[in-house]
Image (cartoon, rainbow, N blue to C red):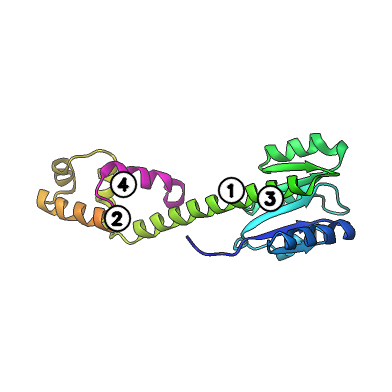
């Protein structure tokens, strides 16, 4: 897994709240970066960012939910925890339907917020590990020659070596050699495992 430092990104227009969150997170040993507006965070956003976002739902200009939608459009996987006032709970529920991981109501207990942040950071770690694994599978598939890829696709479709040989008009021994190279390059000895790997990245290679 790529070793990227996780940061808690705080997006909050109230300076006093922003400063207090920064102090809380630093005292808990977490790297933190604060933003006074959704727009300033969006301008700084990169898909290389790792960690989570603590996002105020109501802010002047672009609000928290608008920022969430823009990040979704960018296929961001950063988990979002919304900070809400009492009247914003229905909005927070809608935000969770759009992919936010949690929300917390003001005034909140610091321990409760830290617990939610820790859970979001763990989710981010798991998502990035899975993404790294899938990217490695794609890299292995791209290392196959066109003929190896053709034979792998037929293997996954359940075709026997003899059938592949007849349809491609090559010898069965040649199919066996290509098949062995496919398994070696894909890093597996099991056809079932090969099928699972390829299916897990199907939308990335089609």
Q: Name the residue under label 4.
A: 194
Local secondary structure at mark 3: helix
* Mark 4 Cα-neighbour bin, 10 Å: few <14, some 14–19, many ≥20: many
Marks 1 and 4 sit apart, C-alpha to C-alpha, by: 26 Å
Say whether disc 4 or disc 2 marks the residue closer to the N-terminus: 2
Which mark lies nearer to you, 4 or 3?
Answer: 3
Q: Nearer the viewer, residue 8 or 180?
A: 8
Whether residue 40 is visible to the viewer of this picture, yes or no, is no
Say whether disc 3 or disc 2 marks the residue closer to the N-terminus: 3
Q: In this view, does 143 lie above or below 120?
A: below
Q: Where is residue 102 in the image (x, y as percent from the top left)?
A: 70, 42
Identify which residue is drawn at 63% across, 47% down: 119
Q: Position of residue 148 (x, y in %)?
A: 25, 55
Marks 3 and 2 sit apart, C-alpha to C-alpha, by: 36 Å
Left or right of 52, for residue 3 = left
Q: Mark 2 points at which residue?
A: 187
Q: Mark 1 points at which residue?
A: 123
Which mark lies nearer to you, 1 or 2?
Answer: 1
Q: Where is residue 195 in the image (x, y as percent from the top left)?
A: 33, 43
Q: Does the magenta stretch include residue 25?
A: no
Circles 4 and 3 in contact, beta carbons < 8 Å: no
Circles 1 and 4 in contact, beta carbons < 8 Å: no
Q: Position of residue 78 (x, y in %)?
A: 64, 53
Identify which residue is drawn at 50% across, 63% down: 2
Marks 3 and 1 sit apart, C-alpha to C-alpha, by: 10 Å
Q: In this view, does 192 lie above or below 145?
A: above
User: Magenta stretch?
Assistant: 188-206
Q: Tell me which secondary structure the magenta stretch mostly adopts.
A: helix
Identify which residue is drawn at 54% across, 50% down: 127
């Amino acid at each position: 897994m790529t070793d990227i430092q996780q940061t808690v990104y705080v997006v909050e227009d109230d300076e006093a709240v922003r400063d207090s969150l920064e102090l809380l997170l630093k005292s808990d040993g977490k790297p933190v970066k604060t933003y006074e507006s959704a727009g300033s965070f969006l301008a700084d956003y990169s898909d290389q960012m790792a960690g989570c976002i603590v996002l105020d739902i109501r802010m002047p200009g672009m609000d928290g939910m608008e920022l969430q939608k823009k990040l979704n459009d960018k296929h961001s996987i950063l988990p979002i925890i919304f900070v809400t006032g009492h009247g914003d709970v229905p909005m927070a529920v809608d935000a969770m339907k759009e992919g936010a991981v949690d929300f917390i109501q003001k005034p909140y207990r610091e321990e409760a917020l830290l617990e939610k942040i820790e859970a979001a950071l763990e989710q981010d770690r798991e998502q990035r590990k899975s993404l790294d694994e899938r990217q490695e599978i794609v890299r292995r598939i791209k290392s196959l020659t066109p003929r190896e890829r053709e034979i792998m696709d037929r293997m996954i479709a359940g075709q026997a070596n003899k059938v592949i040989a007849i349809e491609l008009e090559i010898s069965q021994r040649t199919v066996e050699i290509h098949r062995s190279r496919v398994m070696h390059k894909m890093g597996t000895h099991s056809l079932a495992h090969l099928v699972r790997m390829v299916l897990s990245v199907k939308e990335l290679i089609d």
